Image: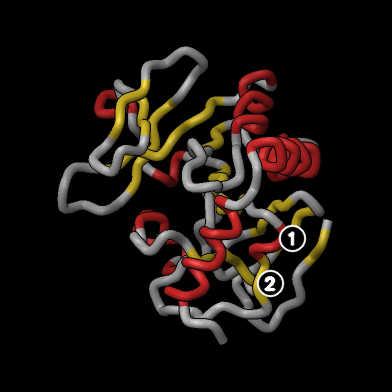
Amino acid sequence: MTDRRTLRRRMRQARRALSPRQRQQLAVAVDRRLHRHKLFYASRHIAAYLAVDGEVDATPLMQRAWAMGKTLYLPVLLPYGENRLWFAPYAPGDRLIPNRFGILEPARASHTRVSPHRLDLVLAPLVAFDDQGNRLGMGGGFYDRSFAYLARHRSYRRPRLLGLAYEFQRQPRLDHQPWDVPLAGVATETGISLFDFDPSSRRRRE
């Protein structure tokens, strides 16, 4: 099993190696796979992200959500020391400002942000994933800390965490850490894989 640091470096290099045209084509393919799925069309409050570092571009899905009358959110950092995410509504034309890591956030986030449990669906970026629902992120732990309650209390069903990825990011198995929060599924350009919290269960491919 490749160690996390090596795998993270290799997958980030592979993402960045994609041309702008390839990224656009793959983003459109992911949108086509997902927008008719019940996880997406049945959700009213959806969080997405602004892609960086070669991540899957969520823009087609964001535009789809707006066209369907859904409320869209972007992740925002809580003040220093928290290292957790809340989410702020985002509509076309809203002003964005960089946070302390240089990632753009809605300018009025401090007045409009909501806690994660208010969401129905979270589209999450990732570096790698496996068929047990394990997610390898950038290493900051923001998503794991923000959604830790989902792993602690299995009765909580909101929001559903759905990773957006390229198919080449799929791994045979990732090293699982106790604090890792599993994904409900992953959407790639080839299809949607749904998981549950039982590592021994089989995934469903849609």
Q: Under tag 1, what secondary structure?
A: strand
Q: Residue furthest top?
A: 93
Find disc 1 in the rendering and name its residue.
Answer: 193
Which amino acid does the dot numbered 2 rest on?
Asp
Q: Eyeballing the image, is 152 above or below 23?
A: below
Badge 2 vs badge 1, beta-carbon distance below 8 Å: yes
Q: Which mark is residue 172?
A: none
The quadrant of the image that shows the N terminus is bottom right
Is residue 42 visible to the viewer in this orientation of the structure? Answer: no
Q: Eyeballing the image, is 108 above or below 177?
A: above
Viewer-closest of 138 and 71: 138
**Residue 5: where, in percent of width, then height?**
43, 74
**Residue 27: where, in percent of width, then height?**
69, 39
Query: How crowded is the residue under tag 2: few (<14 C-alpha within 10 Å), some, or many (20+)?
Result: many
Find disc 2 in the rendering and name its residue.
Answer: 131
**Residue 127: where, in percent of width, then height?**
53, 60
Residue shown at 52% from the left, 28% from the top:
72
Query: How crowded is the residue under tag 1: few (<14 C-alpha within 10 Å), some, or many (20+)?
Result: many
